[in-house]
Amino acid sequence: MNKKTVSIIYLSISVIASSLILSSCKSEPQELEQPEKIYYDQAQRRMKGGNYFGAIDSLTAIETRYPFGKYSEQAQVELIYAYFMNAEDDAAHSSAERFIRLHPRHPNIDYAYFMKGLSSFTADKGFLVRIVGTDLSKRDISGAKDSFSELTEFLTRFPDSQYAPYANQRIVYLRNLIASGELAAADYYIKRGAYVAAIRRANYVIENIPNSSQNLRALNILSTSYQSLGYSKLYKDTQTIIALNASKSQTQSIDSSSWSWKSLIGMSPSSGI
């Protein structure tokens, strides 16, 4: 076989290979890029229908394909809501933090701060928790403390926000939950005879969460601990305080009746676009 014949064979193989590649590329369906508004309207329809997973898909498409478009910033703030309603709390919190960092002067910045605080603790959002009545104070409530702190920051920054009443309701619930959690630990210490540790927990509630529904319970823990340690004067003083407050205050269960997760449905900020 001469060199000319070999060259022709190689050329033929190259042409065939190129044709196959082009044919393969043509056969692969390409996703059509839709106008920005189409994605946004699609996201709105999906959220109204409760399809938050689909809404997330549409909103992220706007961010990816139109990062500087007309609907980009609005898509970012609504993505916080979509993630939250889809029970992706970490993603909602991260999206809120990102929005605050990128758009500190946006008209809906108060919403981002509100949702940041709200998404830090959602242990009571589950259906079974509400029905069975799980005592969350006996679990890890570090997220509740984060949420309390972030919602307090929100109210400090935006006291007149339309979301402030919801934040206030949530803070009351979190305050009582945190206090109850501290006292659950104090009860545990009392059972083990660690009265000094129990006193620290009870004092923390009285000094740092003075308006909680658990103050009388904290005083009773102090009374028990002082008596067990033989601190007669402190015991008598605490008993006097208990007597003065017993008629004014009663230890209440942690009641979230004033707060409803359902109140958040549809609470995505309007675009005004």
Image (cartoon, rainbow, N blue to C red):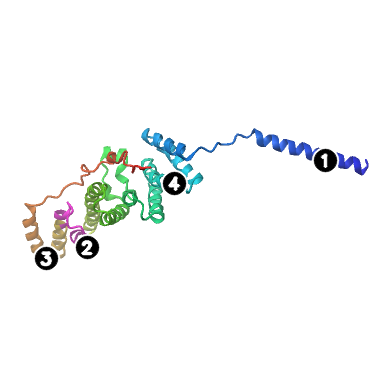
> In the displayed structure, would residue 2 be above or below residue 192?
above
- Mark 3 and mark 4: span between their CA atoms? 62 Å
Q: Are marks 3 and 1 in contact (CB under 8 Å)?
A: no
Label 3: few (<14), some (14–19) or many (≥20) C-alpha neighbours in 10 Å: some
Part of the protein shown in magenta: 200-218
Measuring from the top left, give residue 56's x and y in whole percent. Answer: 43, 41
Q: Amino acid at mark 2?
A: Arg
The quadrant of the picture occupied by the N terminus is: top right
Q: Which residue is mark 3?
A: 234
- Whichever of labels 3 and 4 marks the residue nearer the N terminus, that label is 4
Q: Determine whether the residue tagged by mark 1 lies in a helix, strand or loop.
A: helix
Q: Is residue 44 left or right of residue 179?
A: right
The three-letter amino acid code for the residue at tag 4 is Ser
Q: Earlier in the sequence, mark 3 or mark 2?
A: 2
Instruction: List the residue tagged with mark 2.
Output: 200
Mark 3, secondary structure of its residue: helix
- Disc 3 and disc 2: Cα gap in Å? 14 Å
Determine which residue is flagged by label 1: 11
| Towards the viewer: 172 or 227 | 172
Q: Tell me the amino acid under the disc marked 3.
A: Leu
Residue at (14% x, 54% y) in the render: 216
User: Percent from the top left, x then y, of residue 59?
Assistant: 44, 42
Q: Which mark is residue 72?
A: 4
